[in-house]
Each structure stands twice: as structure tokens, then as C-alpha cells.
Image (cartoon, grey):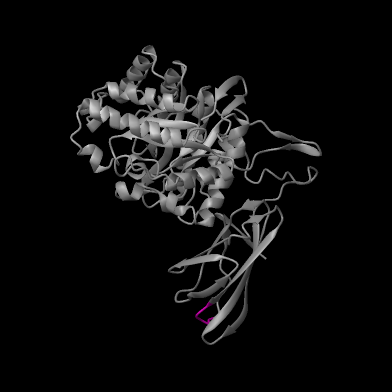
């Protein structure tokens, strides 16, 4: 069943509401985000949202992420995906080469996995994408179809896919990346064979298959006012004048650190003025590696600025990040020497950008438990690292951590002495790279209440004596007990 997607926002009636490459120019001060609506408690003061999805919902917006099908068996990944986001976009499994690898032979199993995941976690689904020049099977690109035949092939694909997911998917990127940088239409098998009319035909076919889904056009490098976004604006205006059923515009927003366009808000607003919903669909902010504290701080400020811009445009339905962990990001594989673009690091620990984005939506880390209003709030964590036994060729270590704020998924990091290797562990999913160790929650112990504790243990290959290392919990340095 389709998740309800109409929400009421402060001062406006909004329609709530991810493709792949982009960049931008220089960011200036954006509008300040509106204050979050706090949830009143019958027994105490208002409680601020402590997850992205709660905070965004309080503002009448959605917050989403692209989901990699191969990660759905990773409990650390899925715990974050289900807890922090209320909208999901298939990274690849709803593209043509996966869904219809050979003519009239449809492979829905991977896409159905995403739908099942989303429905189990009360998340909306952003379908991506029906018609794109890339990731097409060879039978489409090299089929030698004439205009009538290719239009029939395209219509058949759209009709079958949208009908299969009817009543499950709230949004469809109907056409994706149709423009060149100069604002002219990109040459593709569809453009070259059918002509510009394929775009309108695609929208009409999608509407016929699902009258209720929101139908979107999506592109990159159209975030600011430039030749490409002008081309998009003119096309959308023309489609609307022709009565073509188009509901929303997606701005991918694959930004570069310190190069977010100063005209982002004005550009979003002009599309909104056409009566369209406008969404940030694939947000990440990449930087030249290695990352450092100064770059991460600026990145955090710029993530918050994008949120502030969305909140300042009444018809901005929401923001989708293109994956949430640096370890899964597409950036390093495409842009040499670039990366660290996401909200979480390689160990799925939240970065400053996460807290900045949450705060910009009006939330507060740990805010779901206000504690005793008569006492000052407690913050941080306390860790106890104890070698419980030691012999010539090994040792056993027990770690316990008490967290001031509730967590749903934890990652504890620390360094072992050079040459000390973990040989076994329990109550954790533990990995080691050189001296660095990351211990993540198991499937059964990831949720810990405010003031609660968790523990795990491991065995090493050395009985050497050393001082207890400094431990961090989800990026926060813990006090040693």
C-alpha cells in the first residue's frame, strides 16, 4: 500500500516528496531554517526530535537516502537506513538494465526487496528511474528500432514497471539527465530516434499506469541558475503548457565543498512558482582527500545550508542523500582523490555533517529523552577498557560503554598497540585495519537507552602490557572510567 505523502507544514500546504553526477559554484548565506515543531509530552516538557526522519517530519519534509541492494543484509547499514530516513530510493535496481534485461522479460525481485524493506519501516519509495540514456540493456541501445518501434518499447517498459509498483511508489523519476551543459537536449537513443516528444510520451505513459504517483524530471548541474537549468526550466514550462502530467523537479545536488551555487534558493523558487514540487534528490558534498577537521566543519555548515534552503522554499518536499556512509559512496570511484562526501564515515559513525543536518531540521542529538527538567542535561559517554586475563601468547579484553544519550546503532573505535591483533570477539561485529579497531553492535544489542550501557569483548594474539586506549562512541570521545 502506498504510504501517505501529503503533509501539513507550518504556514504552507505541502506535497511531501534520488540519479548520478553533479557539481556546482560558490555558496553564500542561505535562509535560516524554520524552527522545528516540538512534540509535547503529557508528563513533561516538549521533546525535540533526535533522528533525521523525526526532525524533517516535524517540518513537513521528508528525508531520504539511496539504498544499495547488496547492503540490505548488513544490520549496521539497515539500522541506520530504517531509523534515520523516511524515504528510500533504489540506487540501481529500478533502472532499465536490471528491470528489463531482455525484451518483455522483467526482473522485479531486487526492486521488490527495496519495497518490502520500505514498507516494513514505514518509508516512502522514490522510484529511480524509468527513462535514462545510461544503464540501458544493449537490446534497447543497439536494437535498430525506428521511432514508432522505440516509442512502443519505451511505453511498454514504463507501463509494465509502473503498473507493477502501482500503489507502492510515491514518486517516479520519469526521465533522467536529458540535458547537455549548454541547455540543449542530450543526444540519446530516445532523443536521436524519437525526438524531443519522447519526454512528453514518457510522462503520459507513467500517468496512465499510475494516476496517483508523483511524476518527476531529474538532472544534475541544474541546482543554480545557469544555461542547463534554464533549459530545464523552459522544457518544464513547455510541458506544463501542453498539459503534460509533470508534478516535480529533482535537483541532484552532487556538490563540491565550498562550491554550492549562491542561486540555489532562487532557482528552486522559480520551479516552485510553476506550481511544481522541487526536491533535492541525490545530495552529497565531496572534498579533496584527506579529510580534516576544518573541511568536515565546512561540510557540516554546507549540509545545514542546503536544509535551510529547502525549508525556505514552501514547495520543497524534502531532501534525499545519495547514500549515507562514505564507505559506500560512488564518489571515490569516479573522482580521483575525492571523497568523504556523506553524513557517516567509513565505519558508519556520524560525522559533523550529520549533526548539522539534524540541527538544521530543528532536531537535537539525543533529544528523544529530555531527562529530568530540573537537572542539566548529560552528554557524552564513559568507557571502561579492561584486560581481564593475560598470558604469553594472548589476552582477553572486556569493554563496557555507558552512553548519556539513547543510540540506535553504535560503533566504538580505538587503537591497539602495534602488532596486537584481534583473534576472536563476542557481542560485536569487529573489524581491524592496522592498529585501528572498530567494534559495531550486533543485530541484538544496537539499541541503548539514555544512561544505558552495553558491553563486548575480544581476544588478542599478544600478552603485552599496555595502557588502556582512548575510545570513541559514534565519533564522540568517551571519558575513561
Q: Quadrant of the C terminus?
A: bottom right
Which residue appears farthest toward the bottom when viewing the image?
392
**In this view of the protein, can residue 176 be seen by the observer?**
no
For the residue pair 36 and 121, the one nearer the viewer reads as 121
Which residue appears farthest toward the left when viewing the image?
144
Q: Position of residue 396 (x, y in %)?
A: 59, 78
- Dividing the picture into quadrants, the one containing residue 447 is bottom right
For the residue pair 444 and 321, the one nearer the viewer reads as 444
Q: Position of residue 302 (x, y in %)?
A: 46, 36
For the residue pair 390 and 15, the one nearer the viewer reads as 15
Q: Does 398 appear above or below 280?
A: below
Q: Is residue 462 magenta?
A: yes
Q: Does 71 appear above or below 385?
A: above
**In this view of the protein, can residue 63 be seen by the observer?**
yes
- Dividing the picture into quadrants, the one containing residue 129 is top left
For the residue pair 412 and 135, the one nearer the viewer reads as 135
Q: Which residues are magenta?
A: 460-464
Q: Residue at x 45, y 55 (%)?
A: 346
Amino acid at each position: 500500500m502506498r504510504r501517505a505523502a501529503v503533509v501539513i507544514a507550518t504556514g504552507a500546504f505541502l506535497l511531501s516528496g534520488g540519479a548520478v553526477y553533479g557539481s556546482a559554484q560558490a555558496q553564500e548565506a542561505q535562509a535560516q531554517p524554520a524552527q522545528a515543531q516540538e512534540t509535547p509530552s503529557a508528563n513533561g516538557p516538549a521533546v525535540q526530535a533526535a533522528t533525521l526522519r523525526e526532525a524533517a517530519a516535524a517540518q513537513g519534509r521528508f528525508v531520504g537516502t539511496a539504498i544499495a541492494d547488496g547492503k540490505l543484509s548488513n544490520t549496521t547499514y539497515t539500522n541506520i537506513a530504517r531509523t534515520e530516513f523516511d524515504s528510500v530510493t533504489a540506487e540501481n535496481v529500478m533502472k532499465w538494465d536490471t528491470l528489463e534485461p531482455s525484451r518483455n522479460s522483467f526482473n522485479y525481485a531486487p526492486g521488490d526487496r527495496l519495497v518490502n524493506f520500505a514498507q516494513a519501516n514505514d518509508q516512502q519509495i522514490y522510484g529511480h528511474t524509468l527513462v535514462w540514456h545510461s544503464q540501458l540493456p544493449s537490446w534497447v541501445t543497439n536494437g535498430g528500432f525506428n521511432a514508432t518501434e522505440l516509442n512502443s518499447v519505451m511505453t511498454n517498459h514504463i507501463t509494465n514497471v509502473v503498473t507493477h509498483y502501482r500503489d507502492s511508489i510515491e514518486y517516479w523519476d520519469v526521465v533522467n539527465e536529458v540535458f547537455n551543459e549548454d541547455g540543449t537536449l542530450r543526444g540519446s537513443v530516445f532523443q536521436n530516434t524519437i525526438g524531443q516528444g519522447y519526454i512528453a510520451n514518457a510522462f503520459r505513459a507513467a500517468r496512465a499506469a499510475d494516476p496517483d504517483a508523483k511524476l518527476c524530471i531529474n538532472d544534475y548541474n541544474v541546482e543554480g541558475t545557469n544555461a542547463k537549468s534554464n533549459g530545464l526550466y523552459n522544457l518544464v514550462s513547455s510541458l506544463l503548457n501542453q498539459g503534460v502530467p509533470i508534478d516535480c523537479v529533482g535537483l541532484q545536488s552532487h556538490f563540491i565543498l565550498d562550491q554550492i551555487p549562491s542561486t540555489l534558493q532562487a532557482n528552486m523558487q522559480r520551479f516552485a512558482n510553476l506550481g511544481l514540487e522541487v526536491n533535492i534528490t541525490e545530495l552529497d558534498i565531496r572534498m579533496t582527500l584527506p579529510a580534516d577537521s576544518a573541511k568536515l566543519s565546512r561540510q557540516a555548515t554546507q549540509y545545514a545550508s542546503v536544509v535551510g534552503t529547502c525549508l525556505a522554499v514552501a514547495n520543497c518536499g524534502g531532501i534525499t542523500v545519495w547514500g549515507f556512509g562514505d564507505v559506500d559512496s560512488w564518489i571515490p570511484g569516479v573522482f580521483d582523490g575525492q571523497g568523504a562526501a556523506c553524513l557517516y564515515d567509513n565505519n558508519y559513525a556520524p560525522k559533523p555533517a550529520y549533526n548539522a543536518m539534524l540541527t538544521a531540521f530543528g532536531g537535537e542529538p539525543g533529544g528523544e529523552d529530555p531527562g529530568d527538567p530540573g537537572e542539566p542535561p548529560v552528554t557524552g559517554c564513559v568507557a571502561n577498557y579492561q584486560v581481564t586475563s593475560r598470558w604469553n601468547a594472548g589476552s582477553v579484553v572486556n569493554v563496557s560503554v555507558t552512553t548519556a544519550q539513547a543510540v540506535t546503532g553504535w560503533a566504538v573505535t580505538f587503537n591497539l598497540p602495534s602488532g596486537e591483533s584481534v583473534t576472536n570477539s563476542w557481542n560485536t561485529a569487529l573489524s581491524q585495519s592496522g592498529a585501528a579497531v572498530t567494534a559495531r553492535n550486533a543485530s541484538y544489542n544496537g539499541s541503548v537507552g539514555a544512561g544505558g550501557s552495553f558491553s563486548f569483548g575480544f581476544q588478542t594474539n599478544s600478552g603485552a602490557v599496555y595502557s588502556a586506549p582512548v575510545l570513541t562512541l559514534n565519533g564522540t570521545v568517551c571519558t575513561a572510567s
